[in-house]
Image: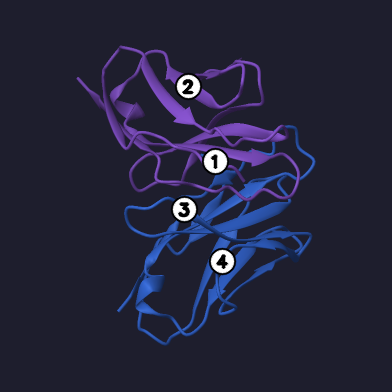
């Protein structure tokens, strides 16, 4: 699986959009970009995934660059409950469900 | 909540002992994966079970073993516990053949080895 690079931490104001970047310059054609988050002392929670098109669901939007070497997770209106560690993961859809977690980005939403 | 449950919530064991952790997968899911999360780090893949057989393994020694039962629940067994085995153990269930195959995680079991 391709490696990803994320900032160690970032702050965000409550009610504002949070934009979380991720670099995955060695991503291959069959690899998807997945985002999970982990709120303190809980198991990771699936957020969204995409291949090359932008995706949106009830939690977030995922913007993937045309060359697929980077992506941005957008939380449109951050709340205090969005404070968590956010993991960007790339993996192939085939070959098993192994998720390779890095250190992630610690996002702190402030009132 | 995901519907994935784990037991026990917390556990304290002594070095050299053996431990069994349990996981019930989300209804309709047929695959269980186990992860180890040391303090301050991301989860690390231990292994995955599908159709009651191991279907992929991470960089963990053989003293980490598992089982999957016909109802898709699973156990993680760790023999000869070491201090470094102290961690949060997470299980995740998914559906092979499902559209997105995203994994749904349980709350974890916090294991402390003294």
Query: What chain is the blue one?
Result: B
Q: The numbered mark 4 sits on a residue in which chain?
A: B
Q: Earlier in the sequence, mark 1 or mark 3?
A: 1
The residue labelled by disc 4 is B59
Distance from label 2 to label 4 (Cα)? 30 Å
Please identify, in this view, whether the residue under mark 1 or under mark 3 is nearer the observer: 3
Taking the spot 59% from the left edge, 62% from the top edge, the residue there is: B58
* Residue at the limit of the structure toward the left, as seen here: A111
Please identify, in this view, whether the residue under mark 4 or under mark 1 is nearer the observer: 4
Please identify, in this view, whether the residue under mark 2 or under mark 3 is nearer the observer: 2
**Of residues B68 and B37, which is closer to you in this image?**
B37
**Residue A53 tag number:** none
- Could you tell me if residue A50 is visible in this image? yes
Label 1: state its secondary structure.
loop
The residue labelled by disc 2 is A72
Label 4: state its secondary structure.
loop
Q: In the figure, is residue B103 to the left or right of B106?
A: right
Q: Quadrant of the C terminus of chain B?
A: bottom left
Neighbourhood count class around disc 1 (C-alpha, 10 Å): few under 14, some 14–19, many 20 upward: some
**Of residues A46 and B20, which is closer to you in this image?**
A46
Distance from label 1 to label 3 (Cα)? 18 Å
Q: In the figure, is residue B55 to the left or right of A14?
A: right
Query: What chain is the purple one?
Result: A
Taking the spot 52% from the left edge, 25% from the top edge, the residue there is: A70
Residue B72 sits above or below residue A45 on the image: below
The residue labelled by disc 3 is B43
Distance from label 1 to label 2 (Cα)? 25 Å
């Amino acid at each position: 699986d391709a490696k990803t690079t994320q900032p160690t931490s970032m702050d965000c104001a409550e009610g504002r959009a949070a934009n979380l970047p991720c670099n995955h310059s060695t991503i291959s054609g069959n690899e998807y970009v997945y985002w999970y988050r982990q709120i303190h002392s809980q198991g990771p929670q699936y957020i969204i995934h995409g291949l090359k098109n932008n995706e949106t669901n009830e939690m977030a939007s995922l913007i993937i660059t045309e060359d697929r070497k980077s992506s941005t997770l957008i939380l449109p209106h951050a709340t205090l409950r969005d404070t968590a560690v956010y993991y960007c993961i790339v993996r192939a859809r085939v070959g098993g469900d192994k998720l390779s977690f890095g250190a992630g980005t610690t996002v702190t939403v402030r009132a | 909540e995901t519907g994935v449950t784990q037991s026990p919530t917390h556990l304290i064991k002594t070095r050299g002992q053996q431990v069994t952790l349990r996981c019930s997968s989300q209804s309709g899911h047929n695959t269980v994966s186990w992860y180890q999360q040391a303090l301050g780090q991301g989860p690390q893949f231990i292994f995955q079970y599908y159709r009651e057989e191991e279907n992929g393994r991470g960089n963990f020694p053989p003293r980490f073993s598992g089982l999957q039962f016909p109802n898709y629940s699973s156990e993680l067994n760790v023999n000869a516990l070491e201090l470094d085995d102290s961690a949060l153990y997470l299980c995740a269930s998914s559906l092979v053949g499902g559209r997105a195959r995203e994994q749904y995680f349980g709350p974890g079991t916090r294991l402390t080895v003294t």
